[in-house]
Amino acid sequence: MKKMTLISILVFLIDRIIKVVISSNFELNVRNEIIDEFFYITNCHNEGAAFSLFSGSTLFLILITLVILFLIYNFLKKKDISRIQKISYGILLGGILGNLFDRIFFGYVIDYFDFVIFNLNFAIFNFADICILIGAIMIILFEGSDNRGRKNTSNSK
């Protein structure tokens, strides 16, 4: 659990630092071109979840997040997980905590990564969102791995 906790704290701190830098140095809702017609930094406030779903429902999103954290905690308390799974959950939890912090203290999540690919403008997101996605994908990929990080093949006949 120590490794997972340290990774969560590290992800959370990186997320906080980036958000403070963005909030302090970029005007709200102004698109700042970084790579010509591809990548922008746009400091914006997202009052919802992914793609602004449940916008304006901050208390609901906080409560849902707390329930999810409780469920993950209880799941991990009962299960022996591999090193790679600890890393995966650490990344996921750090991202969740980063966005939860924003919702609790500001009432919105600070987003800033803004991409345009093939003239399609994607939803603006942040480092915590990336960590949530990567952590979730890793958990799915490495579910059932043993303590050495290899796929557990016992009892598969």
Image (tube, helix red, strand yellow):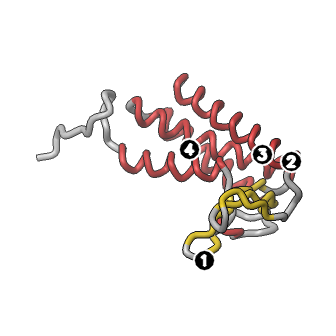
Q: Is residue 73 left or right of residue 147?
A: right
* Of callouts 1 and 4, the N-terminal one: 4
Residue type at the position of mark 1: Asn
Labelled disc at residue 92:
4
At mark 1, the secondary structure is loop
Q: Is residue 114 left or right of residue 151?
A: right
Mark 2 — residue? 25
Using the numbered discs, state the Cα–Cα distance from disc 3 to disc 1 in whole angstroms. 27 Å
Residue type at the position of mark 2: Asn
Residue at the spot 32% in from the left edge and 42% down from the top edge? 144
Mark 3 — residue? 19
Residue 117 visible somewhere in the drawing: yes
Using the numbered discs, state the Cα–Cα distance from disc 2 to disc 4 in whole angstroms. 27 Å
Mark 2 or 3: in front is: 2
Mark 2 or 4: in front is: 2
Percent across and percent down for residue 39 are 65, 61
Labelled disc at residue 21:
none
Going by the picture, which residue comes out furthest to the bottom? 119
Percent across and percent down for residue 152 are 24, 38
